[in-house]
Image (cartoon, rainbow, N blue to C red):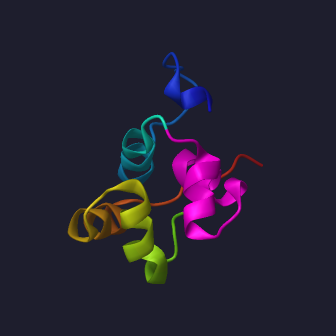
Amino acid sequence: MARQGAARDDLPPLPPLAAALVAARGSRTQQDIADRLGVAQATVSSWESGETKPRSKRLRATGLAYGIGLRRLRSLWFASEPIAKAA
């Protein structure tokens, strides 16, 4: 994902939830997280890019997969709005 590397002025900042997921993933791959959660790698990519958020009913499992406490994850979830895709 381009946002992780050098900063680019033409990209909006990641929502707090997406930034936390990217940071918490560490050296694991998106596929590792996806396999643990039983979702597609594209789903994890969408969460980490800020395009979508995990469904609220999935927060506990998502927190466990990323190593983020449920209370913090819920706070980030409510504070983040998905980034609108350019048309």
Residue at 51% over, 15% down: 6
Question: Which segment did they paint magenta?
Answer: 28-52
Q: Quadrant of residue 8?
A: top right
* Above or below for 21 versus 38: above
Can residue 24 be seen by looking at this rendering? yes
Which of the two residues, 82 or 1, is positioned nearer the viewer here?
A: 1
Query: What percent of the width, then of the height, locates residue 23?
Result: 38, 39
* Residue at the far top in the pictured view: 6
Nearest the viewer among 83 and 71 is 71
Q: Is the N terminus in the top left, top right, bottom left or bottom right quadrant? A: top right
| Residue 50 makes an appearance in the image | no
In the rendered image, the residue lying farthest to the right is 87
Name the foreground residue: 46 vs 66: 66
- Quadrant assignment, res 37: bottom right
Residue sitting at 37 percent across and 65 percent down?
64
Taking the magenta stretch, the answer to whether it contains residue 69 is no
